[in-house]
Image: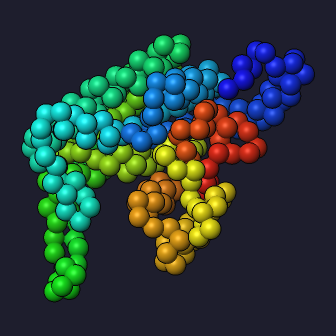
Amino acid sequence: MTDPLKLPPSVQADLLVQALPHMQRYDQQIVCIKYGGNAMGDAATAEDFAEDIVLLEQSGLKPVVCHGGGPQIARMLEKLNIKSEFRQGLRVTDAATVDVVEMVLAGSVNKDIVGFISREGGKAIGLCGKDGNMVTARKVHRTVVDPDSRIEQVLDLGFVGEPETVDTTVLDAVLKAELIPVLAPVCAGADGQTYNVNADTFAGAIAGALGAKRLLLLTDVPGVLDKNKQLIKELTVEECRRLIADGTITGGMIPKIETCIYALEKGVEAVVILDGKVPHAVLIELFTDHGAGTLIRR
């Protein structure tokens, strides 16, 4: 990427003029960013992301980072020779697996992100859903239809949870102190059990509870694509539902869209799905007219 300090002064000034209205729009607004395991990539990608987060905070925004870590969990399970069982494409989180999930997400991945932000001059603090009873989870129950008998069956996914309640007390204090919260989706249930919560769902719950101006879902695809594999720049909730019904939106994009709709219903102004591997994708999305992915509004 071209060093901005090496650009002609007139170009630098033009960039600032273009960015200023966007900065003013988001001044003192909360922006929740979900940083996916697949979007984390290499060290250079992580450094770009950290630079973006620090610049957001220095520009008057209040960034809240929620992260996943699926690939990192898979590598650690393999290293420890713990076999994962999948049912209908979903990972079953047994007692051994949930211990690894907590160790990786609330431990190594969380502190790596905090470290990158700190090296770029930011003041980040790593937390998980358990801290301050921030997010209380309940056990997920999924049902599937047996293809042969056509009988509906209940899937037991073990210690997989979904957000039930969100208490923003800790986050409010952290943001008031001008710190950058970095949140891992490991939560406790009312029964005291540890649950692994999908990072997209977790970020949607956090963004909704905080009344975020934007929720950015960083992933490894450009956004929502049409049937010709072209990026769709903007969608409404109604259009999203139509594209799911007609088969345009399929597979793993469906739960992401469901998270977007959930967050919008909870009060988030707009949600964006974008490619986190694009250098400075967060800044492009928030501070330019061009945008960087698919924006979904109510």
Q: Is residue 57 left or right of residue 170?
A: right
Q: Is residue 139 above or below residue 189?
A: below
Q: Residue furthest left?
A: 95
Q: Nearer the viewer, residue 207 or 154?
A: 154
Residue 12 appears at what percent x and percent y? 82, 22
- Residue visible at 45% across and 67% down? 250
Q: How is the image coloured?
A: rainbow
Quarter of the image for residue 206 reads top left
Percent x, y for residue 297?
Answer: 61, 58
**Left or right: 145 as drawn, with respect to 125:** left
* Residue 76: quarter of image: top left
Q: Is residue 9 above or below residue 276?
A: above
Taking the view exactly as shown, the residue that stands out farthest to the right is 10
- Pick the quarter of the image with the C terminus: bottom right
Residue 216 or residue 262, whichever sits in front: 216
Indicate the position of residue 144 as horizontal and vertical percent values.
Answer: 23, 73
Residue 62 x %, y %: 55, 30
